[in-house]
Amino acid sequence: MRATNTQANNQEVLFQKLGNTWYVFTEIGTEMVYSVLPTGMDPRTTKLELCDVIEKHLKKVAKHSRRSSEAAA
């Protein structure tokens, strides 16, 4: 399932279900970032205004991922 955020910078988001778990994937900068959706959240039935929330969450995940990899180096 694919959704597009209609803000000024059209951000594509891919939702993928693996087993009973939904994941959201997007590209931020040059990095592919993914995260597990909260338990019980189904993108087919959840209003896509939550894409804003998801996008902010994925940016935080990307920042955390960069910090972790920089600290390990």
Image (cartoon, rainbow, N blue to C red):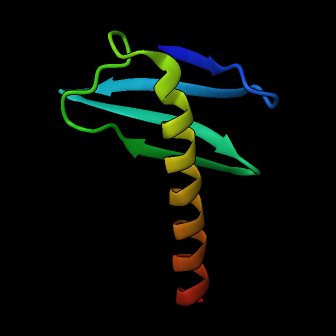
Residue 38's place in the image compared with 51, above or below, is: below
Residue 5's place in the image compared with 1, above or below, is: below
Instruction: Say which residue appears at 59% left-offset and 53% top-offset.
Output: 59
Instruction: Say which residue appears at 60% left-offset and 71% top-offset.
Output: 66
Residue that lies at the very extreme toward the right in this rendered image: 8
Residue sitting nearer the eye, 1 or 63: 63
**Residue 27 appears at what percent x and percent y?**
66, 41
Residue sitting nearer the eye, 68 or 49: 49
**Residue 44 appears at what percent x and percent y?**
36, 10
Image label count = 0
Residue 42, quarter of the rendered image: top left
Would residue 71 be found to the left or right of residue 17 on screen?
right
Would residue 26 be found to the left or right of residue 1 on screen?
right
Would residue 58 be found to the left or right of residue 7 on screen?
left
**Residue 73 appears at what percent x and percent y?**
60, 89
Instruction: Say which residue appears at 52% left-offset and 69% top-offset.
Output: 64
Residue 43's place in the image compared with 59, above or below, is: above
Instruction: Say which residue appears at 53% left-offset and 25% top-offset.
Output: 14
Would residue 47 be found to the left or right of residue 72 on screen?
left
**Residue 55 appears at what percent x and percent y?**
57, 40
Residue sitting nearer the eye, 72 or 44: 44
